[in-house]
Amino acid sequence: MVSVNYRTLAADILEGVGGEGNVAAATHCATRLRLKLRDDAKADTAAVEKLPGVITVMKAGGQYQVVIGNDVPTVFAELGKISRFGSDDAAEEATPEKGNIFNRFIQMVSAIFQPILWPLAAAGLFKAFLTLAANFGWLAPADSTYVVLNASADALFYFLPLFLAITAAKRFKANQFTAMAIAGALVYPSIVALNGTQANFAGIPFSVMNYTSSVIPIIIAVWLQGYLERFLLKVLPSAIRNFMTPLLAMAIMVPLTLLTVGPATIFLANGLSSGITATFTFAPWLAGALLGGFWQVFVVFGLHWGLIPVMLNDIATVGFSVMMAPLLPAVLSQSAAMLAVALRSHSAKRREVAAPAAFSGFLAGVTEPGIYGVNLPLKKPFYFGIAGGAVGGAIVAMGGSAASAFVFPSLIGLPAFTAVGSFVTLLLGTAVAIAIGFLLTFFFGPRETPDTVDAGAAAGSADAPTKEATTATTTGNTVVLAPVAGTAVALSEVPDKVFASGAMGAGMAIIPEQDTVHSPISGTVKVAMKSGHAYGLKTDDGVEVLVHIGIDTVQMNGEGFTPAVVRGQRVEAGDLLATIDRDKIREAGFSDMTIMVVTNTKNLTAVVPVGEGHLDLGVPALDIEL
């Protein structure tokens, strides 16, 4: 195999197309360097095609396209180092995610939480069982056995900022270990001990919040860290760059976060607390509706820390807290929405998260796994949970319900609400909240598509292979599945000469009849275009598969595409790669044909298309002999 020097290749391509002055704009897609030339006649196409690392050259859509393959991001990055054209990082930053601010926020948080969802769900279930054991007297909270188990179950939640630092650093292209150091400082014992006090840094006073279990502060900190590190890497001399970049990042970001994010959160939380407390005096139902509806939103943004001290103070001084009662319908309505997803979603992976999350929410009031892994990513269940919590919160507040002890709002915590106010009204409001969250999600929530449909299942076979069996046959060959349901098309019939010629590798195409595209293999995402139209995947045994949605759809700049994965993420066969709007693609004048090629075909013994005619999602499409 010829070794390619990407810096040299980038320079040779630039020279071959007539120099930097002849290039008006440069970008890239999953496989091609796309150049807009001022004068096509100045380009020596024959010379460019002969360059090591170049597969072919084609002209289409007013662009001079140099086909390179999976290594095109590296070539583009090198191009940015020797010309005025931006590097890959710059290109990605210049392309904002689509949708309104809330949708972009949900996509970001969902992507950051995705890698830790299973441990988070397990920890939530662990806490639920531990709470059950304590309430039934099987374990005493003071017993060392309980202490050890509680630490095991609660550590992930307590140190959540450290876990999020890792995943956020991957998303924002920051150093993971520096991000962890910043997160560690936020939950450092001496910082936690300052919670609720006034401190000062270099003479600048600031209010200290509790960063344990928080989400937004560390995400903001790592986002800024990424920009700071990229700036420092450019301006610092190479002799000190490696150790001064993380040193300055920690020295700047920890105080900056403490001086800005914490005080801002506390200011908003205190204002929220004062407003809700005042509302309880003249309109309890309204205060109950606000707390019941938006409690989980407050938790996501860390604003609940301004309300908890008020609740604790009320219990300590007057013996009860009316602010705690609406939290019960708030939590259980969201849990009910999770349960509906567990029963109705066609995605097995989503159900596997939703079921234990609903259980831990109902039993122990632990909703983080379900909020971040189910309701928030799917949006509608989260909205329905808010609606149920608001109605239920208004009802329990009108009944004067209150908690005589500080407990997690859950079914096990119900005894704490029996002493003050109308317990019947509390049960009624909670039941209404559960009904609204469950029924709205059950009947109107997103159904999602199956993660994978194998050949046996499609034919109704009783001995259909398991999900694990869909990535390898009994002969040891690797099987690549159909990423979307639709009509199979031979690669030679694809209206794009690069794909049709087989220059990118053997494969096939599918004219889709659904709006979701799924991973055809189990492996790692090596390429995930910000535009959402193309994904490069690699199996553990080295098979490289490109899933390209549409032809020339890179020109849509992400319109009509919603990515569901990020580069570096582990996926299983059948996992969602992207959601597409086929009508929008066609309206823009592009084909929505989804192309799937094995880009390292030359290194394999054989790649044989086995799918033809109409294909269901997840049936075998390509058979590969290693």
Image: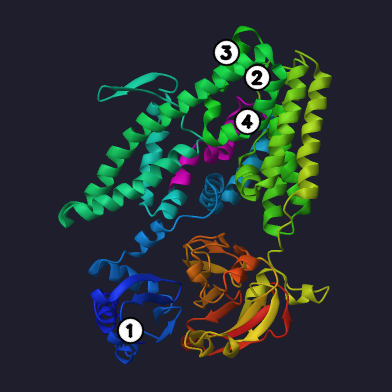
Compute the Cα span from label 3 to label 4.
19 Å
Q: Are marks 4 and 2 in contact (CB under 8 Å)?
A: no
Which x, y percent locates residue 56?
A: 40, 87
Task: Give 58 or 521, whichever is nearer the viewer.
Answer: 58
Mark sitting earlier along the chain (4/2): 4
Mark sitting earlier along the chain (1/2): 1
Q: Which residue is mark 1?
A: 40
Compute the Cα span from label 3 to label 1.
75 Å
Question: Circle 3 — which element?
Answer: helix
Q: Which mark is residue 313?
A: 3
Instruction: Say what amino acid the circle numbered 2 marks.
Output: Met
Instruction: Specify whether 588 is left or right of 74.
Output: right
Structure colour scheme: rainbow
Mark sitting earlier along the chain (3/1): 1
Q: Which residue is mark 2?
A: 323
The answer to whether residue 224 is seen in the rendering is: yes
